[in-house]
Image (tube, helix red, strand yellow):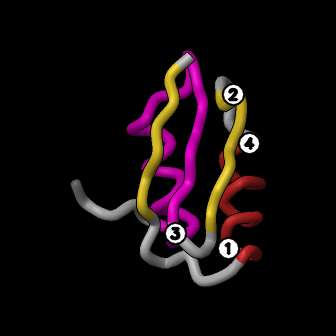
Amino acid sequence: MTSKTAQIPNISCGGCVQAIRLELSQMPGVASVSGDAAQRSIEVEYEAPATWKAIVAALEEIEYPPAAG
């Protein structure tokens, strides 16, 4: 299981975190998604077939792209 944390500058409230959680939790291989609106960050635990590249693509699609870096 891989765990990654990403800064998401577009997060402004708990509703944003919930939208991200709902979107990513539907992806095969994503085990958990948690977020912190105050820190503008999310943590995703995943395994194959999910990949970080696919997770980033899903975030970009719903207009919550991770910060570069």
Label 2 packing within 10 angstroms: few (<14), some (14-19), many (20+): few
What is the x, y in percent for residue 62? 57, 67
Q: Are marks 3 and 2 in contact (CB under 8 Å)?
A: no
Q: Residue tagged by mark 1?
A: 16
Q: Amino acid at mark 1?
A: Cys
Q: Are marks 4 and 2 in contact (CB under 8 Å)?
A: no
Cα gap from disc 3 to disc 2, whole angstroms: 27 Å
User: Could you tell whether 21 is left or right of 61 in the image?
Assistant: right
Label 3 packing within 10 angstroms: few (<14), some (14-19), many (20+): few
Q: What secondary structure is found at the residue carrying circle 4?
A: helix
Quarter residue 12 falls in: bottom right
Residue at (46% x, 29% y) in the render: 51
Q: What secondary structure is found at the residue carrying circle 3?
A: loop
User: Could you tell whether 9 is left or right of 45 in the image?
Assistant: left
Cα gap from disc 4 to disc 2, whole angstroms: 8 Å
Q: Nearer the viewer, mark 2 or mark 1?
A: 1
Q: Amino acid at mark 4?
A: Ser
Q: What secondary structure is found at the residue carrying circle 1?
A: helix
Mark number displayed over residue 67: none
Q: Amino acid at mark 2?
A: Pro
Q: Residue tagged by mark 3?
A: 39
Residue at (58% x, 40% y) in the render: 44
Cα gap from disc 4 to disc 3, whole angstroms: 20 Å
Q: Which residues are magenta?
A: 41-64
Q: Residue tagged by mark 4?
A: 25
